[in-house]
Amino acid sequence: MPDDKLLITAFPVFSSHSTNVSEDVMKIILGISPKSLNVDAELLTVDKQGSCLISQKIRDGVKYRGIIHLGLASNRDRINLERVAKNLISMSEPDNSGRRIESQKIETDGPPNLETTAPIHILDEEFEHDDFVEWSTDAGGFVCNETYYRTLHALNQTDNSDTPTIFVHLPPAEFIPAEKQAKIVTKIAESMVLRPTYDVVAALLFDDKGRILACKRPTQDAWAGWWEFPGGKVDAGESYSQALSREIEEEMGVSIEPGDLVESISFDYEDRTVRLQIWNCGIINPDSITLTEHDDSRWLSRQELLDVKWLPADLPIIIRWMEEGIPS
């Protein structure tokens, strides 16, 4: 199998369930996914043999562009991105082979937990405002978690730990229709293996002394501790002005009216391309700000612009403003 394949796996019905939405979603994806994803699919049996299939292929030398395991979570109403696989089988019911294990390690030589190798920060950006998707740290104790752990363990043992891999638990179709879930999983796949391009808007905010506002990125985000203009990603269906007003309200609790566009650049990070627009949003009262997402903020004069460590996309603008002056 060529190593440019994105593998998507699913499971058939098990236990008392009459359907398994993961199988339905996988079949839909095969019909709707763009050729650029080059999807390969595998229906795994709900037993030890199924849980070992992909890990054995990896040990046999098969390489993948990325791996998405899908499974049914009958007690959940949202799509769950599983951050962690546990080295533990703990079954409350037998699998399709009749096997039932109360508590046992999956791999005797493996660590207690293995974390997803999918690009967490990219997925955070992509689904930040999606009410149908959330992160989970509990993949359960059944064959889903067993499959996930075996796959991650095999990737680590064969020096393929850079292969983006994640388990996605899907709710029954009564909560989210299978067609919609398939579109979301396709979006997950694109975020994992295709270089994303984001339209980002930022606010140039002044205090009454002519200083501009810089904000420090929080510890849980990519580029934690670096400084940036307040703002964020433009969501589907939003205008730039709408997106900027929403982001500033969410990040600082301040209502603004974006004015003139003062900068527009494209910048290539290692894992994404950012098309950044900076808008003059006028003067605000520093006492009106309540930070909800950033760790800190500072008001900087022209002479102080390089007193903080700016994001790479912002830095060329800042250097030019040091030389030419801040747009007013």
Image: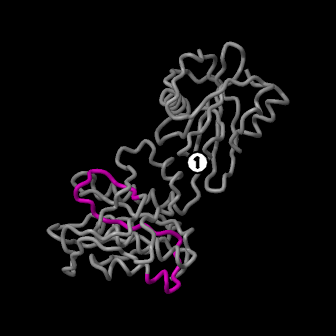
Write the start and end of the magenta stretch as one range.
56-82
Count of all numbered marks drawn on residues in the image: 1
Residue nearest the viewer, comparing 177 with 150? 150
Q: Residue at x 56, y 61 (%)?
A: 194
Q: Where's residue 115, x and y in %?
A: 47, 62
Residue 58 colored in magenta in the image:
yes
Q: Identify residue for label 1.
A: 222
Q: Residue at x 65, y 30 (%)?
A: 214
The answer to whether 206 is drawn above or below residue 108 in the figure is above
Residue nearest the viewer, comparing 257 with 78? 78
Q: Is residue 151 visible?
A: yes
Q: Is residue 242 visible?
A: no
Say which quarter of the image contains residue 284.
top right
Q: Residue furthest left?
A: 16
Q: Is residue 244 left or right of residue 49?
A: right
**Amino acid bearing label 1:** Ala
Q: Where's residue 313, x and y in %?
A: 70, 43
**SS at badge 1:** loop
Q: Where's residue 191, x and y in %?
A: 51, 57
Q: Where's residue 165, x and y in %?
A: 47, 66
In the rendered image, the quadrant that contains the C terminus is top right
Q: Is residue 285 left or right of residue 236?
A: right
Label 1 neighbour load within 10 Å: few <14, some 14-19, many 20+? some
Q: Residue furthest bottom?
A: 60
The colour scheme applied to this rendered structure is one colour
Residue 107 colored in magenta in the image:
no
Q: Residue furthest top?
A: 208
